Image (cartoon, rainbow, N blue to C red):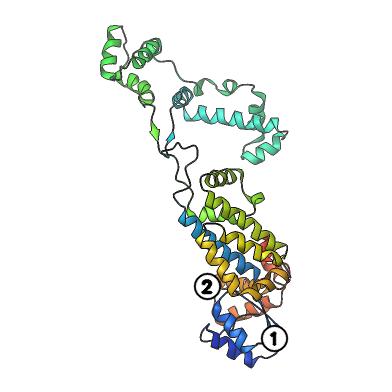
Amino acid sequence: MLPPQGPGRDAETLATWLREHPGPEIICRDRAGAYADGARTGAPQAVQVADPFHLWQNLATAVERCVHQHTACPQPPDADENGIVHISFADEQDTAQEMSPIEARLRERHRVVHALLDQGHGIREIARELHLGSNTVRRTARAETPEQLLTGRHQPRPTQLDPYKPYADKQREEGCTNAVRLHAELKELSYQATYRTLSHYLRPRRRPRIHTVGPEPPGVRQVTAWMMRHPDRLRDDERQQLGKILAHCPELTAADHLVRTFSQILTTRSGQHLKDWITATRAEDLPGLHTFAHGLENDWDAVIHGLTTHWNSGPVEGRVNQIKMIKRQMFGRAQLPLLRKRVLLTALRPPHSVTGNRPGDRPHENLA
């Protein structure tokens, strides 16, 4: 049943509307207290049902409060006790910095193509996936090593500095980081190239091994979304990050377990276990979930009906989404008569033809 479209959303407005439209037996509503009072006053004979989707939404709000209270617990991946990630520039990275962009791209393409070939993919499939020509993929597949793809114009050109590179590297390892002084020493050894050539060679090697702060930890809403989503629908990197966060915070680990338990009650309509869930929730140090559990008890009958019967607001929400979609499509393009006609014509079509929801679907099942 849709809430009344009147001057307000208070209990009296709903009660008045129900008196003017007598006879409802089931009232499926959200968790607003005004709707509960209005339905109780205007249709005392009707059975009130708390919509399962709104129950799940209320739980998400409570979990978000819990995550917000423990924002200091999540640590960056691979961080030490000070929250610092140690990153050093390895020799392979120094070598990669010497490559030209074309050479780096060819080496990466060779690696990706041969990895896909090892997985059993064909030339055409790889070309389609990587947006490359078939001949390019075929030529890359025939090359056993990346060097076979590097023609003369892709390879580093020899320079006058090449015979002196071992000496320059040795001086750098011994602590000589002054390029001007090193250039003067090389000139005494008959080095004839310019200072710029030497400086360009030393530039990537001047970077010290540094300590840098790791990436920002995921935000409160991101962690909440991971906890509220089905574990099978998390990407591998999301599952790993969530696991590291839960490992640093016992309270969030308990909250995650309670979310999974509540999702089982919700999807299997086993509301008879709700009392046990509330008892387990109150045993944990999670004030946000305590508030949610207290709200469930205050609306106990409607919540139990929502967790044990098939009644839900899915079809109504589908119609609302249809109307909102049409409003966005028509914004600034036509006046009210055409908008009204489109809404009326769409109302004759089943909700799942536009929104993808089948009649009787429980929208929370995609979340839990």
Q: Name the residue under label 1.
A: 24
Whether 144 is drawn above or below 237: the answer is: above
Neighbour tally class for label 2: few under 14, some 14-19, many 20 plus, Cα within 10 Å: few
| Residue 334 falls in image quadrant | bottom right
Residue 121, image quadrant? top right
x, y percent for residue 15: 59, 88
Does 162 appear above or below 257?
A: above
Say which residue appears at 61% left-offset and 53% top-offset: 257
Q: Residue 205 carries which label?
A: none
Q: Is residue 226 left or right of residue 177?
A: right
Mark 2 — residue?
331
Circle nearer the N terminus (1, 2): 1
Image-quadrant location for residue 264: bottom right
Q: Position of residue 303 (x, y in %)?
A: 65, 72
Q: Which amino acid does label 2 sit on?
A: Phe
**What distance separates the C-alpha of mark 1 from that of mark 2?**
36 Å
Secondary structure beneath dot 2 equals: loop
| Callout 1: SS | loop
What quarter of the picture does the C terminus occupy?
Answer: bottom right
| Residue 341 seen in the current view | yes
Q: Which amino acid does label 1 sit on?
A: Pro
Q: Where is residue 139 in the image (x, y as percent from the top left)?
A: 65, 27
The residue positioned 60% from the left and 69% from the top of the image is 54
Q: Position of residue 146 (x, y in %)?
A: 58, 23
Does the rendering let one see residue 368? no
Of 294 and 361, the residue lying toward us: 294
* Residue at x-position 65% and y-position 41%: 129
Whether residue 129 sits left or right of residue 66 in the image: it is: right
